Every structure is written in C-alpha cells, then in structure tokens.
Amino acid sequence: MAAYRCSLCARLLLLLILLLYALVHSEEIKQGNIHHVSGVNKPQTPAETVERPLEERQWEATEVNEAVSSDAAAHLLDYPGPDSVLTSTPQLKDDFREELVIRPLHSGDIYASFQFRTVWETDFTRGSKVSHYRLFPKSLGQVISKFSVRELHISFTQGYWRTMQWGQPYLPSPPGAELWVWFQDTVTDVDATWKELTNVLSGIFCASLNFIDSTNTVQPSASFKPLGTANGTDHRFLRYATLPREIVCTENLTPWKKLLPCGSKAGLAVLLKSEKLFHSSFHSQAVHIRPVCQDWQCKTTSLELRQTLNVVFDLHTSGQGKREWSLFKMFSRTLTESCPLASSSKIYIDTTDNPQEEQFELSPATPLLSQAVVLGDRRTFSVYDLTQQVTFGTVRSLNVLIRWKSTEGDMLRPLLHAERYVAGYGLQTGEIHTLIYNNHPFRSFPVLLLDSVPWYLRLYVHTLTVTSKGKDNKPSYIHYQPSKDRIRPHLLEMLLQLPPHSVTEVTVQFERALLKWTEYTPDPNHGFYVGSSVISALVPSTVAMSTNITQEQPLFSTFFPCKEESNYFMRVYTEPLLVNLPTPDFSMPYNVICLTCTVVAVGYGSLYNLLTRSFQIEEPSPGLAKRIANVIRKMRGVPPL
Amino acid sequence: MGLLSDPNRRRALISMLTRLNTPICVLCYFAGVCWFMGLAFEPFTLRTYMSENAMGSTMVEERFPSGERALATGREFAAHKKKVGGIPVDWLVKTMQARGLEVFTQSFSRTLPFPDENKERYIVKGTNVYGILRAPRAPRTEALVLSAPCSPGDQNNQAVGLLLGLAHYFRSQIFWAKDIIFLVNEHDLIGMQAWLESYHHTNTTGMDWSPLQGRGGSIQAALSLELSSDVITSLDIVLEGLNGQLPNLDLANLFYAFCQKIGVLCTIQGRLQRNDWDSVSGYSHAVQTMMLMVMKQASGRPWGDHGLFLRYHIEAASIKGINSFRQYKTDLTTVGRLLEGMFRKLNNLLERLHQSYFFYLMPSLSHFVSIGYYMPAFGLLAVILLLRALDLWVLIANPPAVTADGVADLEQSSTGVLSVLTPLVISHLTGAALYILPTHFQEIAVEHFPVSETEAVVLTAIAVYTAGLALPHNTHRLLTGEGTEQGWRVLKLVAVLYLAVLLGCTALINFSLGFILALTLVPVAALVTPHVPKALSAVVLVILSPACTLLFSVFFFQELQEMPVSFQEGWLLYLSVISQGILDHYLYGSLVYPLVALMIYPCWLLFWNILFWK
C-alpha cells in the first residue's frame, strides 16, 4: 500500500511538471488541441515531441509499479476507483476488460466463451501519427492506421457450430477463416489496399490469408453492415472473403494470445492451453476492431478491440461418461488471479435453465447474479468477480465445478437455422440446396441470404427457385453479380420473408467447370470447397414469444407483446460444401500424353489421310535416255516414244 | 500405313483377309476364349497391393472391446423388432441418442410395378433410422457410412448390435475427421435407395421419401454389414454393384489387409483362396471364383446394400459374416476391431479413393486381373465382327460375277438399302414391345388368364420374345417381296457393325456382360447366311439367342455355386430371374433389361431375319 501511494505521489509530481512545461509552451498545446479534438492525447503530444526520455521513464515506473504490487491491483476496487488511476496516467485513456461465459449445454457438452475487450480513446482517422501504445497491441494499431481500416473482423474457426444441439452461439463464425473489412472512405484503391492488408494479416495471425484474392472476395451490398459507429454504408469500401479450407491450430492461437495485454501470463488467458483447447468439438477465435462511442452523446469515438475465443468441450470424448465439468477438467488449469491490467475480470455461468439447481449444481456458490438479454432471451448468470480476493477463497484458486443431475439431451428447435447440401450425382451438373428453417410458431421475419460461389461452379441463375410451404416465395430484393472465370466469384444476395413455422428452400443448379491442369490443387480428388452461406436476420425475440409471462407480472405490462428487445439481430452460417470437379487422372500424365499423341498421330492422321485421298496408279516417269530420245524425236517431227 | 496407301499391297492384304477370313475368325474366337480362361491362372495375374498412400503405411491400433455388449444390444434389438413387427424406430432413436449421436428418421413408400414374389412384397412402406456421429472440429464436409439392414425374421440382428456397439465406441474417440453415419435401413435395397436418393435429392425411380433432416456432406466411402450369428467362421466381401459397377480396388485391399492383420478368414464369392495354383484343382478353383464374379457382374444387379452407393461415386462394399462348420470361430469383438481398423484408415483418407483400379476381376482375394489384361479377350472376339464386316464390304463392292453391267448393280444396291431399313425398324419395334408390354399389360393378362401379376409379366415377356421370331421375315416379304442376294449382305453388314458397336460399348461399362453376350452372339453373327441349312441353323440361332443365354447362365451359376438344380427348378428360377431383372430396372435403375430388350434382342432378330431371307 505504501509503495502504491509513493508511486501515486511520483506520478502526480510528474504531472505537475508536465503541466508547468505545457504552460510555458502553450502554443504547442494549442496545436495539439487542434489535432486531437478528443483531448485524450492532450498531454501526450508535448511529452512525445519534447520530453521523450522523461515520458519513457514514467512508463517504466508504472510498469514496475504494476508488476511489483499485485495486491495493489487487487485493492484498486477498495480505492476511490480505477478512474482515479486512469486520470493519474492521463497519457492514454484505455481500458481492458476480460470475461468468460460458460454455458452448460443441453447435450451435456459445455460452451466456454472468452471475451477480451480493449477500448482506446484514440482516433486514427484524423491522419495523426499514433506511436504510443499501452494496452492496445501495436501490431494491430499500425495496421489500422496504415491501411485506413475503419472496421475489421477476422475469425478462425475449426468445426461447425451445431445449432440443433447447442442453440445459438454468442458470436457466430463460419468454418475456416473469415475476414471482412470496412475501409475509410479516404482510401482510393480499395482492392490494392485489401490485397496488402490480407498479406499483412496473414503474417500477424500465421494463417493462409494471403490466399484471399479477387477470386474469393466479394462486396456484399446488404449483409455486412458496419457494427461500429459509422454512417457511411457505401459497400464499395467493404470487402468480404472466406477461406473454408483454412485449418486452425496452435500456430494461430499463439499470435492471437500475444495481442492480449497480459499475454497468457495472468488473468483468464492462463486457461488458454492449446492442448486442451484443441481437444474439443468446436474452436473459434476472432478479432473484432470497430469504432465505438465514447460517451452517450457520441461526439467522439474510441477504438474497440474485441478478442473472442469460443470453445465447446465434448461430453463423450473427454467426460469419461460423467456429466461433470470444472475449469480444471476443461482447461487443465485453475484461476488464481485476474489480469492486473484489467479493469474488470469476471466469469459468468449461464444458470437460466437452472433456477432451483434442478439441472446441475454449481460450486463454489456465488451470491452475485446478473441478468442480460442475450439473443432475444433473458438469461440469468451467476457471476464470479476475479478482481475480488474473496472469489478465490481460502485455497487461493478458483475451480468452478458444474455437476449435472439430469441426463436428458434432446435436440433443440432453434428459431432460425439453416443447412446446405449439393444434390445430384455425376460430374457434370449439380444443384445447391439451401434450407432455412423458421421455427417461430406465428411470426414471419425477413432474412438476408448471402451466397458467394467460386467461379468454377457455373451457376444457372435462371434455375434459381425459392419455395416455402410448397409455394413460390418471391424475394423482395436480389443482388446478383455473375462470376468471371478466374477473376471473381458469383455473389448472390437475397432478401427473403420466411413464413412462420416453415422451411424455405433455395435451389440453384450449376455446372462444374473443367479447370486448366495447373489450376487443380495438389489433392484434386479431395474436392473443392464452397464457402458457407451467410444468413442475417432480425429474429423475433423469445421474450415476446413466451406465453406464461403472466406469472408474477402486472397484467397491464404484458398486453402488447412488443418490447424494446422484441427483435434481435442474428447471423447464421451454413456448412461449407465440398464439391468434386471433373478431374483428369494425374497419376499417369506421361502415359496419357504418350497414348494421346500416338493415337492422334498414327491412328487419326493416317486414317484421315486414307479417307480423304484418292489413289490412282501413275506411270513411273520416263528415264533420262528416253527423255533425250523424245526431245530428238520432237525436233525431227516424229511422235515421241 | 504405307501398306494401305499402296493400292497393290492393299489389294493383296484384302484378298488375303477375305480368303483366310474363316480360319482367322475361328482362331480369334478360340484365342479369345483361351485368353479369358488364362486370366485365372495365377502367374498371369497381379497380386493386390494398396495404392492409396493415406491408407498404406499409417499405423492404426484397433481397440474395440465390447463385442459381448454388442451381442446383448443385438438381442435387445431383436426383441423390440419382434414386438413391433418391423423396424423398432423409437427404440433405435433412443439407443442412438443415448450413444451421443444426432438421430434422424426417414420414411418412404414405394409401390412396385408388380408384386415381388421372391420377397413377397408389393406395396412397401418403411422407415430408415440413422445417427450421425459428428466429427469434432470438422465442418460437415465429408462423411463415411456404416449400414446394417433391418431384415425380417432373425436375420442381421447381430449386425445392428455391432453397429450400435461401434457407434458407442467411436463416439468416445477424438480422432475422427469425417462424420460417420450409422444407418439402419428397412426393406434392404429399397430402403437404401430411398435414403440415398433423399441424401442426394434425386429421384430416378419414382419413389416417395420424406426429406432428410441431417446430412454429413459428401460421402467418401460406405460399408454395409450383414451378420446373422453370434460367432462367425469367415467374412465375405461383396463388391458387385448396380450395372456391374465395382468399388475401387483399394477398398477390397483394405479389407484383405485387415483380415490378414487380425487373423480372420476372408473370402470372396464365398470361396477361400488356395495356394496350389499349379494343380488342376487349384486352377479350376480360381476359374470358378472368377466366373462367379463375371456372372454376378453381368447380371447388373446390386448384390448387397452397398451396390446402390456406386452410382453416386461412393466407394462401397458389403461385408457378410458367414458361420459354417469350420472349427476356428471368430467372435464379434474381432469383427468390431476389423471394422474399426477399416474405418480409421478410411478416416485418414485425404482424397476420395481413386488411386487403384475401378475395372478388375478377382480370381481370388489376393490376386486381380486389371482392365488391361482382360480387355484383349473381348477384343479378340470383337475383331471377328470387324473381319466379317470387311469381308462383306469387299463382297458388296465387287460382287462375284452376279451382274454383267453396272446399271443393274446400282439398282440392286438401292433396293438393298431400302430392304435394310424395314427389318431394322420392325425388329426395334419388337424390342420396344418387349420393353413396354410386360408391365403395361399385366392387368389385362391377369383378367384373361389364370395367372398372378408376376407370372403375367414374365409370361408376356416370353410371349413377346417368341412372337418376335415369327414377325420380321414375314413382314419384310410382305413389304419388299423376294429378298435379293445383295440385300441380305447389306443387312448383315449393318447388323454386324451394329453388334460390334453395341458389344464394344457394353464391354467398356460392364465387361462381364459384354463378354458373355459376345461369346454367344459373335458366332451367330459370323456364321449366319441364307444359304446354310435352315432347320439346323434355326435351332443353333435360338440356342444362342439372348434368352437362352440367360437360361444357360442360370444353370451355370447354380453349378458354380455348387447348388445344381433340376430342369424343372431351373425353369422356375429362370422365370424368377426374368421378373427380378425387370424389377431391378424399375426399382433401382438397372440397365440390363432395357439393354437386352431395346438393343441386343433387335440386333439378334436381324440375324434371324437374314437366316430366313429367301
């Protein structure tokens, strides 16, 4: 405590010196003000430009302070508040929060979702050069400023989210890699920037994002709107690409973990051990960067970096039959501390279906409860606050344990889900079927369907049919961009109205192209991937749907079913497709070449020759002596021999 | 080719070919037959070897422990089956769910074109139950299938038990990279057809099925399991599928490799392989095994539930457990381990099976004859047709002093062309009648004659076939009067070339069928002229006609299976084979019946026509 106070004094002293300095050079400050309207970096600019050594020393001091007194971080809450700390280091207003949500699933599996959020009150858009980073990873910051990125969403997923068994995920993502980026409207050559950006990201995340090129990039017109504060929705500045074949593994996890302020040294991130994370049914990690409002007036924006990691552990492969989960069993680690840099560090356990502990029992018990509306459903969570020392108990380690009591594992009927498959047989044509299920008993709702199909499946758009309940369902909006061979893929976006309690089937026929022989992958008989379709929907909330709302609630409040959360946004990805294309036999190219050449040269050539020529017997040309004799006879006027 | 462009030498070559035509043809025929018989001789065949690297050297450990539990499950299944009197859908759904699978059901119904008397079914209604084991961290793009039929009576209960046992064991493993679909299909092939059509959303045969709710992406390989006893002495692999399609040879190799590794006796065509290839009995054993495969392939019908997968480019085989009176018995745990091993290797596949052969014959499980070795046998037979065609062509071009002036010759050839068209059209119309009438006139036949529907269909087919024998030569006489010498030559030239093309195409798709047809039809095509003794030739021609070929094949097949039948039984069997062939066409899309009715039979009628030209 004493050490902490000392450091605080030192900081205040420094601040005073800085202020004095600033007063002397007031003109410079004004300039700084003009540049940084936000005011966040106000004192930083002079420090940066003039007093660099001084500033560095201060940062070291802070770091040492943080490292030395881990108690201090724990006691922050007791103190007037973290705000005071932030004001005491006014260089950067950034904030880091970490969270783990655990949802026991009906099937007996368990879903763990990590979220790490860094909010930084800075603005790259104004053309200023930001070179000072605290919590925000510098590698990403540089990318954002260099490529004028407004929003960036990247996800790596291994496995397919089983909606029928697990319900809806908090953050959906398609199998493989997905990247979508909104650029600033100052970018002139978006395609070139996009190309460069994918290559840079490929290096940062150790992934094959460099395989993103014009043949798998599309510009959706409606499906992907900016998620942050932005009013420009000109889709010329949007690029979307998926790599369904991308395999996610440790090499992608390590750079992802390095972006966290505490790395994997402290806080929730210690749980992210790759040998356990990849011993699971589903693994998805993502990075989302977007501008968010700083305050309720939204005069200035700050940058939000959200790193998420979702994982589903399988009951059967790791449970040994016992329906019992604990942090240790899932991650082979327990928690002993929160990240000292985090302003909030919490574990939420979804206990909505378990109000009286009839489904599972939770230990250690926690008095904290929290309610939130997630995906249109009011959920209750038990909360463990890791910044409180109490949470860790006497053993100074937290190992949350969930023990199931019931054993039922029925399939769910999610309000919206979709599947896709290739119909037909043979290697000439085929048909893509997309089935969209609306399981809402009485409400219809619109969905946006986005399909991006590689050029080597030539879609016959005239065969596009949309049927629901046996009737033709005319889409109210269609955006179709035909493919160009070897240049760009097909893009099909449709706005469909799904009737209540129905299955809508979208079918389109295609022809399989014969590729050039160098265009085949090294394993052509494996097939070629078609990325997931994306279904974006505004789904009526289940809160409004529930019929037994009358219990414990005044009648006047429940007449109109519409509440403010009556619709919620949801995105569903279908499975990717694996399509076989006509493939030559690569195993014997030499034999094939020899045989073909022989057949063409010998067989066809000579037959053609025989068939087109007419043969006549010709007298052999006369010998030299005879010719001379004839010349003489001609001169003599006698008929030749 | 210099030989052909020199007119003198060309003339010499042609005259030699026409002069020695008959001896060369006879030689070719016997050479073809001998070549074919030689294929089964072991030194002439290749040993099987694993071509696919992903399945070759990778180590797989088989640990399936619970054969006894699988047996218990099988007994439970049998009890529930008996109680429900069909497939116990609810019990299967519950059991599969308890094993951690995603379970779906599919109902289907099919009214057969006429009652199937072998299996006693006419209106078929059933349900398939399947559970999908979702591979961890795989995006539902690839799948493998393990199926077991839910047969009536006490058949295949152990297969379903083992399937559920394997499902339970597989579910607790982490290494799966492809979804595994465990399918219990009712009404054997009809159920399988319904499931496959629904999975691929096609409808080739007019079946009613409910759409599938869950899928696993593109199916890479499938195994169908048939087990009817608690212990087995050997395992038999069945490869022949619809229209004589065969799975990739690597699938058979995989089975053989695991049988060797685990120490289970394995057979093909129900026959063990012998090591005494140099003895006469050893050789005849190999010939019989190969002939069985040829007969089964030529029939064009699926010989197991796997047979329908092949249409969808899915490599599939049936594995049958056989319990005979041998001493050495294998329990279900071992069979389970074998299947586990096979599935783990299939799971390791990076690409579809494509490395090894798709066209082969197997004289034993360890040896195979590839397309390059067996095609010459057919080629030697087909060459006879071409030689005869050449001979006829020369004869037509230079008629041996029949007419003095060219004008009369011209006239004759023009009438020849006309006289060719009429028999061609009429014989094809007869063929079309043979294809259409049996199924369409069954009601009328049943009304007027005291026969069942099935009998009506078969007897109508035979009646149309026989009526065809009388039809063409009468009509052509009616239309064009007396046939000329030149006329039958042109007709025979056309018929011979037609047969050559027909047999060539058939042999490319289904070698066995092409070869058997060539064996009987080529002598007919080569020998027949209007000048041979009528009665004798007519008998020979009828004996070598497609229908009689089928009759002989039935007896020969029974002989090969060591189940000889009397003529009476054979005749009944023959009738049922015809009805099965027609049913296979309507139920599964087998092409043998339309091929014979619409192509081969009219072609044979042309030769029949030539015999009665004058």
Image: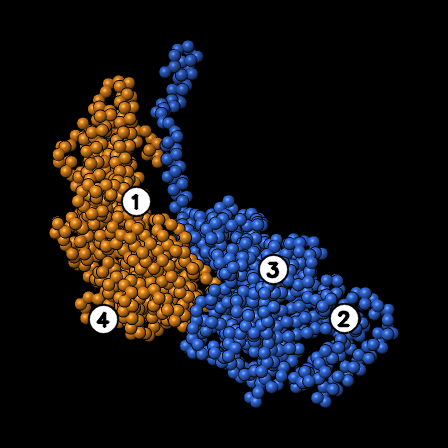
Chain colours: A blue, B orange
Pinpoint the chain carrying mark 4. B
Query: Marks 2 and 3: CB-CB under 8 Å?
Result: no
Give the residue type at disc 4.
Lys
Q: Is residue B377 visible?
A: no
Dot 4 crowding, Cα within 10 Å, few <14, some 14–19, many 20+: some
**Disc 3 and disc 4: Cα gap in Å?**
61 Å
Q: Quadrant of residue A190?
A: bottom right
Circles 1 and 3 on the same subunit: no
Which element carries disc 1, helix, strand or loop? Answer: helix
Q: Tell me if A116 is positioned left or right of A311 in this view.
A: right
Query: Marks 3 and 4: same chain?
Result: no
Q: Residue B329 carries which label?
A: 4
Q: Name the residue under label 3.
A: A180
Residue A55 image point, x, y percent:
76, 76
Residue identified by numbered label 2? A41
Estimate how packed mark 3 is, as few (under 14), some (14 to 19) or many (20 or more) residues with alpha carbons within 10 Å.
Answer: many
- Could you tell me which secondary element the residue under label 2 belongs to? loop
SS for dot 3: strand
**Is mark 1 in CB contact (under 8 Å) with mark 3?**
no
Comparing B4 with A631, the one in front is B4
CA–CA distance in space, label 4 to label 1 = 42 Å
Q: Note whether residue A110 is visible.
A: yes
Residue under label 1: B506
